[in-house]
Image (cartoon, rainbow, N blue to C red):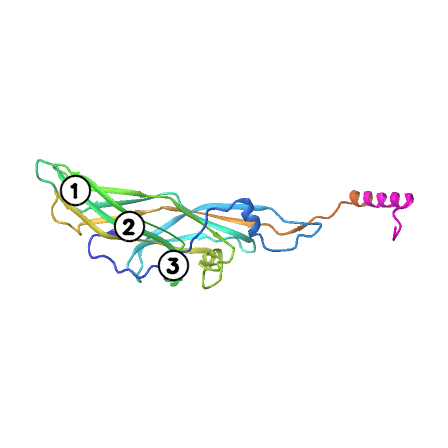
């Protein structure tokens, strides 16, 4: 939650990880751990497991002064091979409401205003101070409304677009660490969960009453997503295909028949 007043101090934003859309089955096959697939050996099955996690209480990051909240997202199951992970928000609603400003007149008081908003999903700063930004969004919001006779305040809001990202196990050659987006995401794991932080920032906040002077105080900004979607694609272990006893016996009988009939002689 942000209250009207001096803007918070903001640091340089971390570099965001650019992620592709959810991979197709063919792309997932390419992400499979490299191994020789010789005769009698085949790859196992793919499985995707997903869920929702609720956000934690509203807090403020002491490092940059930005409001936000924590997410404890279940990490992948230990001992399983993860090909990719996906995170996403289906919707985010933000609310801009004024403090008490009674309209004692007999006419409407018109109100107009605007602001720039942005959000980012990263690791919990106190645990991972150098964590990258995994998802982010930004935009500009303007509004026109009024406070009717006898009214006390205004209340407006906006809906941010849905955002999601997929984090592949393929190493990222453009990153200095030469790690994959999936490795960098799973590095946020602590105690069996991904410790993530959703930060909000609102800048250039201004509004006017009846085309008067700009006001920058006397309001509350709040909102953001309430749940986060997560999914993991698992690869099952490689399995060996062993011929059945009936198949082996059939091959031996066929070999004996060829031997009695006389097969090709060496050098023929």
Label located before the other in sequence (2 or 3): 3
Q: Residue at x 55, y 50 (%)?
A: 234
User: Residue 249: horizontal and vertical position, in percent?
Assistant: 82, 44
Say few, some or many: other residues with alpha carbon within 10 Å of mark 2 (under 14 / 14 to 19 / 20 or more).
some
Q: Is 263 in front, or is 123?
A: 263
Task: Quickly name the residue at label 2.
Answer: 117
Kindly check if marks 1 and 3 are in contact, taking CB atoms under 8 A apart as contact. Answer: no
Q: Specify the farthest residue to the left.
A: 105
Residue 239: % across, % down: 66, 50
Identify the residue at the far front of this view. 268
* Residue 19 appears anywhere in the view: yes
Q: Secondary structure at mark 3?
A: loop
Query: Residue 148 lies in magenta, yes or no?
Result: no
Q: Nearer the viewer, mark 1 or mark 3?
A: 3
The answer to if 266 sits in the magenta stretch is yes
Which type of secondary structure does the marked residue at label 1 adopt? strand
Where residue 111 is drawn, which disc sits there?
1
Q: Position of residue 168 (x, y in %)?
A: 49, 53
For residue 74, side relative to residue 116 (left or right) = right
Q: Quadrant of residue 94?
A: top left
Asked if residue 65 is positioned above or below residue 248 in the image, the reply reads: below
- Looking at the image, residue 140 sits to the left or right of residue 103; the answer is right
| Residue 136 shown left or right of residue 184 in the figure | left
Residue on which the image places disc 3: 15
Give the magenta-colored segment's residue range: 250-268
Q: Of helix, strand and loop, which mostly describes the magenta segment?
A: helix
């Amino acid at each position: 939650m942000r209250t009207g007043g001096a803007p918070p101090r903001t640091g340089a934003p971390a570099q965001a990880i650019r992620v592709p859309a959810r991979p197709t089955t063919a792309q997932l096959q390419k992400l499979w751990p490299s191994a020789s697939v010789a005769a009698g050996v085949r790859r196992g099955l793919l499985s995707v497991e997903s869920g929702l996690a609720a956000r934690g209480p509203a807090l403020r990051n002491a490092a940059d002064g930005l409001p936000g909240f924590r997410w404890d997202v279940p990490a992948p199951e230990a001992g399983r091979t993860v090909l990719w992970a996906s995170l996403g928000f289906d919707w985010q609603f933000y609310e801009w409401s004024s403090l008490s400003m009674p309209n004692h007149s007999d006419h409407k008081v018109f109100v107009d205003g605007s602001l720039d908003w942005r959000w980012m999903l990263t690791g919990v700063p106190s645990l991972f101070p150098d964590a990258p930004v995994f998802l982010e969004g930004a935009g500009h919001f303007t509004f026109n409304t009024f406070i009717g006779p006898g009214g006390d305040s205004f209340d407006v809001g906006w809906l941010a677009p849905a955002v999601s990202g997929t984090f592949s196990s393929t190493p990222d050659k453009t990153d200095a660490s030469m790690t994959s987006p999936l490795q960098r995401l799973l590095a946020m794991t602590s105690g069996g969960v991904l410790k993530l932080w959703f930060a909000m920032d609102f800048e250039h906040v201004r509004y006017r009453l009846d085309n008067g002077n700009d006001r920058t105080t006397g309001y509350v900004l709040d909102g953001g997503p309430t749940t986060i979607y997560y999914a993991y694609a698992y690869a099952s272990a490689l399995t060996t295909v062993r011929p059945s006893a009936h198949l082996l016996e059939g091959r031996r009988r066929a070999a004996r028949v060829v031997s009695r009939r006389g097969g090709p002689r060496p050098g023929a």
